[in-house]
Image: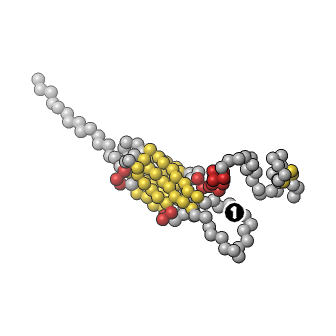
Amino acid sequence: MSLIPSILGNRRSNVLDPFSLDVWDPFRDFPFPTSVSVSARENSAFVSTRVDWKETPEAHVFKADIPGLSKEEVKVQIEDDKVLHISGERNVQKEDRNDTWHRVERSSGKFTRRFRLPDNAKVDKVKASMENGVLTVTVPKVEVKKPHVKSIEISG
């Protein structure tokens, strides 16, 4: 593996090595506050939890991919009767002094997603379930009553 000198200092980098699995971070040497840059790097993969939202005639259905989390690590809340709030946290795995880590790719940290619900959402009947790392939140819709039409006979 060839090492290429870094243009940002005395560190050496293998950024151009096609067989390297290291990811180059162009902001690594900038003077960002440690808490921001470290947490952003550690949580970048987990923060962007993907959610599908589809509307059926009966309900709004949200499906979120959150692999590796149990239902106890995920919260589903309705805020102010109009916002669906899905959040959770994956904790950092504790290290054992006898373990030798070769690579850590599974991210840890918190995620949160918010969705403004339409006026036809029945927020008091929301249901959530989790199976195989997919959270499904079902928000029933208020039944729209069709106007009752009564024909009136015209006399005359």
On the rendered structure, is 67 left or right of 125? Answer: right
- Name the residue at 20% across, 36% down: 150
Please count the marks in the image. Answer: 1
What colour scheme does the image use?
secondary structure
Q: Residue at x 61, y 60 (%)?
A: 108
Please state the horizontal and vertical placement of residue 137, each as a whole percent of the image: 45, 55
Q: Nearer the viewer, residue 41 or 70?
A: 41
Of all residues, the one furthest to the left in this rendering is 156
* Residue placed most toward the observer, 140 or 106: 106
Classify 8 as above or below 90. above
| Residue at x-position 82% and y-position 56% | 19
Residue 80: percent from the left, percent from the top? 38, 47
For this orientation, the residue located farthest to the top is 156
* Residue at 32% over, 46% down: 143
**Figure quadrant of the N terminus:** bottom right
Q: Quadrant of the C terminus?
A: top left
In the rendered image, residue 114, in percent from the top left (x then y), is placed at: 48, 48
Q: Which residue is mark 1?
A: 104
Q: Nearer the viewer, residue 147 or 137?
A: 137
Mark 1 surroundings: few (<14), some (14-19) or many (≥20) residues within 10 A: few
Above-or-below relation of 133 to 47: below
- Identify the image quadrant of residue 132: bottom right
Amino acid type for the residue under numbered disc 1: Val
Where 71 sits versus 61, above or below?
below
Q: Secondary structure at mark 1?
A: loop
Image location of residue 74, percent across then percent down: 49, 60
Is residue 119 among what the camera can see? Answer: yes
